[in-house]
Each structure stands twice: as C-alpha cells, then as structure tokens.
Image (cartoon, rainbow, N blue to C red):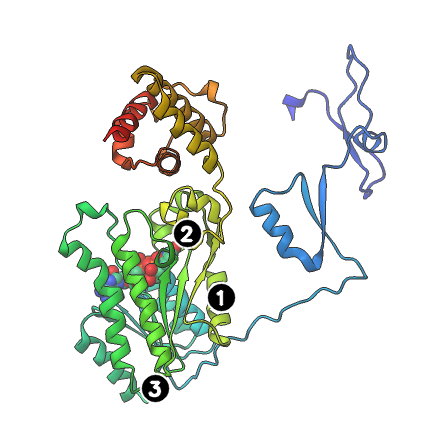
Amino acid sequence: MPWLGRPWRVRGRAGSRCRELLRPPRALPWAPCPPSSARITDGVYRPLPQQTYPAGRVADALSALRHSRHLGKAVLTFPDTEPIVVTRPDDGPGLQPAATYVISGGLSGLGAATARHLASRGARSLALIGRRGAASPEAVLLLDELREQGVDVTAYAADITDGAAVAAVFDQAERKGRPVRGVVHAAMQLDDAPLDELDTSRVRDVLAPKVRGAEVLDELSRHSALDFFVVYSSVTALIGNMHQAPYAGANLHLESLMRARREQGLPGLALGWGGISDTGYVARTLLDDTIARSGIGLISPRTAMAALDRHLGRESEAAVVIGVMEWERLASILPSLTRPRFSTRLRRIAGAPAPEASADLRHRLTAADDDAARHALIAEALREMTAATLHTTPDRVNCSAGLADLGLDSLMAAELKVHLQQTFGCELGLMEFMAAGNLSGVAERIDRALRR
Ligand SMILES: NC(=O)c1ccc[n+]([C@@H]2O[C@H](COP(=O)([O-])OP(=O)(O)OC[C@H]3O[C@@H](n4cnc5c(N)ncnc54)[C@H](OP(=O)(O)O)[C@@H]3O)[C@@H](O)[C@H]2O)c1
C-alpha cells in the first residue's frame, strides 16, 4: 500500500483480541500515544453515559430511545432476580386449505404483502382483485412466487365497486369447491389536495374504492361463513391529515362499517395503519422520510402482518390503530390533535407557547402604543417561535431572509403555523404563510389578521 509509506506492523499474539496495528516508527516531534488498551485502563477513554434497564422493561428502554429521553446509551441488563415476561406471539387465524381468501388491492403494496402472508400461513386459494389485474406492475413476480408455493391464485381485473364483477369472483370460488372464508379489503386511491381545490368527481374517486368497495364485499359475503373480514384503514381516520379529507373520511366510514358488522354478530376488523415501509404508496412515492419526520414512524410489512395475526387471533376492538406515532410531534403539525379530546394523551406540544405566555403577549399587543410597537412585538414572538422550530437561537434567525433560506420546509412551516394559531389566536393558511416570503411578511399578515 504505497500511500501508507512504510509497512504497518502488528503487535500481540496471533489470534489474540489485543493485537494492534502499529504505525511504523517515524521521527515525530511529540511523544507517541500509548496503545488504546492502555488509554482505557488509564481512564483516558471513559464509558459513555448510560441508563440501564432490566430486560423485562425493554419497552421502556425503546420508548426512551424513541422520544430521545436518554443520554448516551440505553443498556439492557439480565438480572437473576427479575423474571423476564415473554409474551408468546399469537398463532393468528387458522387458514383453511379448502377455502378462498379474497384480497382487494391484493396485487400491490400492503395487499400483496397480505397475499404472501396468508399463503405462508396455509392459504391455498387466493383471489386478488385490482382494476389492472395481472397487468399491475408487481403482479408478475407475486403470482409466480405464490404459484411456486402451490397456491391457486387468480388475479381479477375488476373494479371493487362493481358488484357484478366481484360477485363473479365469489361464484368462481364456490364453483371450485373453495368458498370464500376470508376477506381483506386493501384497495385505495389517493388524490391529495386542499379541500377548496377538490370537486365532486375527485372526492368520489377517493371515496368509491374504500366506501363502495367495502359495501360490495360486505353485501356479497353476508351468506358466506367468513372467518374474518378485515379492512385496511389509516390513522388519518382518527386524526385527519392535511390534504386528505376524503381519504380520512373514507377510512372513518370503513371503521363504522366494521362496528356495525360486529353488532350484527359478523366478523369485522378495521386496521388503521400508521405508515408502512418498503412497499405500497408511501414507499413507491418516496414519502418515507416526510412521513417519518411528521411523527408517523414506518413499520415493516412483516411487523404489520404480525399485528394482523395478533388482532385476528384474539378478541380485538372493531377498529384499532397500528403504528409508531410520535403524538407530540404530530400535534405540532396537525391542529386537530390540539383539540380537547386528545388532551389526555398529549403533553404540551414541544416548542409551542405556554398558555400564560400567549395571554401575556396578547395583552401587550393590546396595550402597544402604536403600530410600530405592535409590529415589533409580533416580529419578536415570531422570531422566537421560528428559532424553536429550527432548533436554533433567535439571534440566528434573520426576519428579512427568505423562508426557504432560513431552512424552513413545508413540514416546519405547518408546525410554525400551528404555534402561531395558538399564540395569536388567528388562522394563517399555509399558502398565505409561504407566500409571505420572509418572517417580516408573515408578521405583517398576522398584524392584519389580528385587526380584522
Ligand atoms: N402504505 C401505507 O403506508 C399505508 C398507510 C396507512 C394505510 N394504508 C392502507 O393500506 C391499504 C394498501 O395501501 P398501499 O399503500 O399498499 O396501496 P397501493 O400500493 O397504492 O395499492 C392500492 C391497490 O388498490 C387497487 N385499487 C385502487 N382502486 C381500486 C378499485 N376501484 N378497484 C379495485 N382495486 C383498486 C390498486 O390497483 P389498481 O390501480 O390496479 O386498481 C392497488 O393495487 C390501503 O387501504 C391504505 O389505505 C397504507
């Protein structure tokens, strides 16, 4: 290795873990450092700070890591004195080889992952429905894989809202002597936009596959002795989401349909996923990072399928949310989470002003001598909030710099917007916020809104 100059030497017994690579001796103007093992025993290198948790409290350790409540390392210990409680994973539903399982949206994303999962659990006949059928981009690989495992799988090119087309799927299963015994409704279509940009047809396109599709499956399966009827919903049914009103509404409908089925003694389970990694819409559109930063952690399809098993395998609520949510972080972006019904679950939002501070600021604004004083008060409060959002100090926030130049992206702007609403009690649309250009512009808009 010519770039290293003279060859390196190895010190210590061969096979010993203490062998060290030694730089060849050179005429150095300073004393060579002692070997690293000596620096450990000398106390030059000290262990990082650590918090220890007995293995039985691994969940607490992970929670501390997730919420950055730890300093240094979280260390698990295995004390003899404390028993470790292990929960046996559920075996999930017993799948019948002589039955067919129908999956809408089963030719891509989480629906396809579900098809693979059901096959791995013993399903031998699958009916996968999507408008593109076998022409879906993921279908070729999926179908090959399932057939190699001996699964009788059919890809149906059908719209899940088309009752006659879906009835044909159920009929074919009967004719094969493998009647439908389980349904997973995963079909969805998204069209994200602010409400005022949507029209009837755009809203209908999002609602139809979820709402009408679930109704079609519900009606057609009423006479089948189903072991399960699962719909894939989303955490948005619980908390809403910017630009996803029709999607959130559709998922909410799915959940109420599952409750109604339960009340009638029929199986019904709505799984409200948070975010799924590696497959499906979020992974395909490269939104992983944005979703994770908004406070919705992504879980792998494998974890999702383990949750499916768990909830099918035991008495569960008709609608459950499954995901890793950082509620405080989410609340800093979604105003809906600041509503009283979530108050018991959420501490005060990080970076948000304390209620007393907001009241004091509003009082000072009312008492301000003139427009210039008012404006200065607003600008200063805004500078402090922006600094908190950017995790910096107010003196480093330039009110004349462009919002993008400050490092504010749209998620941060949404967070700041919620804080503004809580501080000044006035609503500033996200577009209006971004259009202001810089913080001085935002301050002017707040001032105008307060005077209205
Ligand atoms: N991925 C996530 O992070 C996430 C998070 C929360 C909830 N979920 C839920 O999980 C489910 C699957 O999500 P995904 O991300 O895996 O979705 P995806 O990959 O986009 O798959 C959606 C599937 O639905 C089918 N579909 C759409 N409209 C249809 C219609 N009218 N009739 C029949 N099939 C239709 C699509 O196929 P065609 O286009 O060929 O019809 C496609 O195969 C959805 O219900 C979603 O709400 C997912």
Which of the two discs, 3 and 2, labels the residue nearer the N terminus?
3
Residue 137 visible to an observer of this rendering: no
Q: How many residues crowd around disc 3 within 10 Å: few (fewer than 14), some, or many (20 or more)?
A: many
Which structural element holds mark 2? helix
Which quarter of the figure has residue 51?
top right
- In the image, 13 versus 362, the foreground residue is 362
Q: Quadrant of the N terminus?
A: top right
How many callouts does the rendering have? 3
Q: Position of residue 18 (x, y in %)?
A: 82, 38
338 vs 127: above or below: above
Which structural element holds mark 1? helix
The residue that label 1 is drawn on is 307
Residues marked 3 and 2 touching at CB (< 8 Å): no
Q: Position of residue 345 (x, y in %)?
A: 49, 53
Q: Give the number of the mark in front: 3 or 2.
A: 2
Q: Quadrant of the C terminus?
A: top left
Real-space Cα distance between discs 1 and 2? 29 Å
Q: Position of residue 137 (x, y in %)?
A: 29, 58
Which quarter of the figure has residue 143?
bottom left
Three-letter amino acid code of the residue under disc 3 = Arg
- Which residue is located at x 79 percent, y 13 percent? 30
Q: How many residues crowd around disc 1 within 10 Å: few (fewer than 14), some, or many (20 or more)?
A: some
Q: Give the number of the mark in front: 1 or 3.
A: 1
- Which residue is located at x 48 percent, y 36 percent? 354
Q: Give the number of the mark in front: 1 or 2.
A: 2
Which of the two discs, 1 and 2, labels the residue nearer the N terminus?
1
The residue that label 2 is drawn on is 340
- In the image, 33 versus 325, the foreground residue is 325
- Which residue is located at x 23 percent, y 46 percent? 193
The residue that label 3 is drawn on is 178
List the single residue furthest toward the top. Answer: 29
